[in-house]
Image: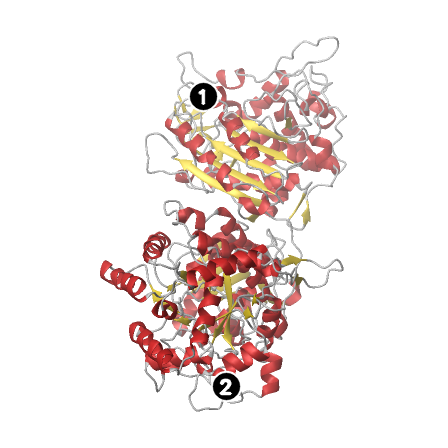
Amino acid sequence: MKIFWTNSIAGVIISVGVAMGLMGSYHKEADGKPTQWALKEDNAPSKAVFEANRWADSVFSKMTLEEKIGQVFMIATYSDRNETYYRHVDNLIKNHHIGGLIFFKGGPSRQAKLVNRYQALSKVPLMVGIDGEWGLGMRLDSIDDFPKQMTLGAIQDNQYIYKMGRMIGRQCQLAGIQVNFAPVADINSNPRNPVIGLRSFGEDRENVTAKAAAYMKGLQHQRVIATAKHFPGHGDTGTDSHFTLPVLSHSTDHLTQTDLYPFQKLIADSLTGIITGHLYVPVLDNRPHLASSLSEKIVTDLLKKQMGFQGLVFTDAMNMKGVTRGRTPVEANIKALVAGNDVLLYPESVIESVRRIKEGVSRGTIAMDVIDEKVRKILRAKYWTGLHLTKPIPVVALNASLQAPEVKALTRDLCEQAVTLVRNDNQLLPLSSLDTCSFASIAIGGGGINLFQQTLSKYAPFKHIVYADKPTTNQEIEGLVAQAANANVVMVSLHDTRRNFNRPFTITPATVELLNRLQQKAKVIVSIFATPYALKQLPATSAVVCAYENLPDLEVVAAEQIFGALPFKGKLPVSIENTYELGTGIITKPLNRLQIGYPEQVGMSAEVLNKIDTLVERSIQARIFPGCEVVVARKGRVVFQRSYGTLTYDNLTEKVTNETLYDVASVTKVAATLQAVMYLHEEGVLDLKQKAAHYLPELVGTNKAAITIEDLLLHRSGLVSFYPKLWERTKTGGGGLMTEYYSSIRDSVYSMQIAPKLFAKPALRDSVWKGIIQSPMRKEVNGKHSFVYSDLGILVLQKVVERITNQPLDEFLSQNFYEPLGMMTATYLPLGRFPESQIAPTENDFSYRNQLLRGTVHDQMAAVYGGVAGHAGLFSTAYDLAILMQMNLQKGHYGDRRYFQEKTLPFFSKMYDSAHHRGLGWDKAPTSGESNFVAATASSNSFGHSGFTGTMVWVDPKEELVFVMLSNRVHPNAENNEINRKRIRRRVHEIVYQAIIKDGK
């Protein structure tokens, strides 16, 4: 179809669909075939066409010749210069009437202020452009980059490319930009191309065309002019037109079938702009040293007449050596104009060029009709972009708007679709069995522990090695091999951190030798965060991941895909000589491990979730707790993980981090004992209707002989809540501790740690169990025991579990749950594995242990039980508990391993006692909505538990939601109950539900 901004006898012939806003829509075909583009077309005149012409004509009619000539100049400018420079630009606008600006290096707020300033000076609104192939971050600081086009070329669903184009278009609108000089429509058929490379969607013409169309449509749906470049095709050149004139030595047939193909398709689809490249194409115009951008045969005869392009034609930058060779800037500008270009981009010698063009018009060497036609087209383009309604850009909130959460979410989505697995010997990836592997990672060229390594550590324990430069010597190789010697799986990541990627990314011979040496002793997984063309240099290893560039989101995604949190989906958009074919890409299945993501990816609002910050910070200021951790996961993604405050009120340098361990108190009941009970129940070795005495013969003949396992889980066994005599009887009359039980020094006799500086005889643990057996029972009412929340009941369950498994509870849990799940911090007795500085302290206990408790359990009964108790004693980070709760949310499946049968979790977590909101072991949301820690909006099938120290886990299958909050509210005094009085956990939980966007995906 014909594109707009053209003259005819009747006035203007414009496609109404285009004039109304490029009504093309992206849609999936019903049969699942590749997506197609549709453009609503109506050739009848429209009100929009009439208004565009009326505005353009009204402006045009008042313009002098100099003002008209000025419209074809789009000068380069910057927002990181000084006032003298800005006044120079002022002069060009005010006195020489230039029509547009292309901004380069600078910052968004500074640029916006200058756009406002320059627009205010200009009689005709200025058309503002930017070279934003991978978004505004390509030119502006403080703005994150989208992936480059080569990375996007690996994506199989072009809907994501369209979304990116639309998002960049939205950013352009916010920043007062009307033209984005993108997409690159060049087919990168030359791997050694020094200037296109990663800027191209690849070497396949259909893939390049489809993705360029998606990008184009996204921009144009935001009323931003998209410009395909670099016509007639810069992909098969061996030199850079910035420095010389590249030669494209193809036949006419080859050009038509390859280089010109994307441009022809885009023109037919609705393309609004094209950039002509500075190339020498002798088959099209063999005049020596004549750039295609200066050739009327190429610009007018081929592009406009034969190919039917009627949108705006921009030159490539007129300061490039490929166009200025053998001629002055003024001569080049005039020749480009006469050749058929509508806008001269980045021209030099503007004032002299305007004067010379004016002379040419006067002498008749440049037709006035040519100038008028270009100016009218430019004015109609300005109208279409909304410049007739131009308003000052709101600068104050611009940065935040440009970096909106939706931008980050989309970037992550793009990266998740792009990363490509090109080699996978014996289906090594994704890694499923964590407990049988020992891991190391070596980052080469990354400089410091990078996001790739940090993300790897969320799935398994790693020894991380960083080599800032590329190894070059045998000594360096030996050192790296020695550091990774104990690992049977080694991740090697190669990072190209250069901003200028025009030179090839080289892998040193020493790096190749390192990979060969490592492969001899371990399974080596190479992840390359650089051009895919570098794959040719790699030796054979167990697996190879191509991540295309060193973008932070790609580092996170690649690590997640290696461990199966995400599937590999990408396919190589280029062929790698003698190594990999075009389209290579091994698709893997997800293993249902937690991913790291953004709220908007799962239908939540980051803005709302951020309200948690305010609530928590105020709680810290009110001394409700010194610090805490909060983790929110939805639909398998951790979308909120933050740490607040400090470990204590006294030492403000000890900050809470995501690696801080908390005493989770009664959360232990569901995160430890209940997991074991559910496991043994479905194994058929634990009958919930059976009496506990069946498993514990010592209960036979006692007042506890009739208690069933179900009674214990529902807290209706008749056991008292707790039994203070279990530790009170070890105290002296003056409040001290009996030396026959305790010592401040650990030795062979006093070997059981009760507190950081207090140790007891192990026999004390046995006396606790005897005390439980001898403890009083509550009276029955109408032949039944009523509900009383009892720690003793969970201790009895622990004993049952240990008797059946013939194994201590902590060992059983570690082997069957925590280690295979990748829960690297969940543990009893944390001081045996972690430094005290990593553990949040609880109470400064003056009633029993007479010291600050840090790294030993706060609960007194759990302490005298040796720190490993069914009701308390577990320590963990919030993230590790989120892993466990995610497994429970997924009905026992996680990491390609089934921990429970699918029916087990629903059976245990359904409501059994609505009056006391209890499932089997699990706490439930009260039907009344009244709770100190559960949001009123939590669904009826949600479940979880809270802990005395200020902790909470909650799972909501309806919303696919996991919530974890850990604090040490009992520090320094357990009598501080403000967390419950002010319902802080509930209020944080409610914010999480408020963040759910009801119509979200």
Residue under circle 1? 978
Describe the element under mark 1 as helix, strand or loop.
helix
Give the mark nearer the N terminus: 1 vs 2.
2
Answer whether residue 626 is visible to the viewer in this image.
Answer: no
- The local crowd at label 1, few if under 14, some if 14 to 19, many if 20 or more residues have their Cα within 10 Å, is some
* Residue drawn at x 41%, y 26% as measured from the top left: 971
Residue 90 place in picture, x, y as percent:
28, 61
Q: Disc 1 to disc 2, how far (Cα)?
A: 78 Å
Q: Which mark is residue 427?
A: none
* Element at label 2: loop
Q: Residue 244 location in percent, x, y?
A: 39, 83
Question: Tag 1: residue type?
Answer: Glu
Horizontal placement of 358 versus 507: left or right? Answer: left
Q: Nearer the viewer, residue 98 or 248?
A: 98
- Residue underneath mark 2: 281
User: Percent position (x, y) of residue 543?
Assistant: 59, 66
User: Would residue 218 be found to the left or right of residue 716 on screen?
Assistant: left
Q: Is residue 143 left or right of residue 27?
A: left
Q: Amino acid at mark 2?
A: Val
Quadrant for the C terminus in the image: top right
**Residue 978, placed above or below residue 874:** above
Q: Considering only vertical position in the picture, is 64 above or below 800?
A: below
Query: What quarter of the picture does the N terminus occupy?
Result: bottom right
Q: Quadrant of residue 926?
A: top right
Q: Residue at x 36, y 45 (%)?
A: 396
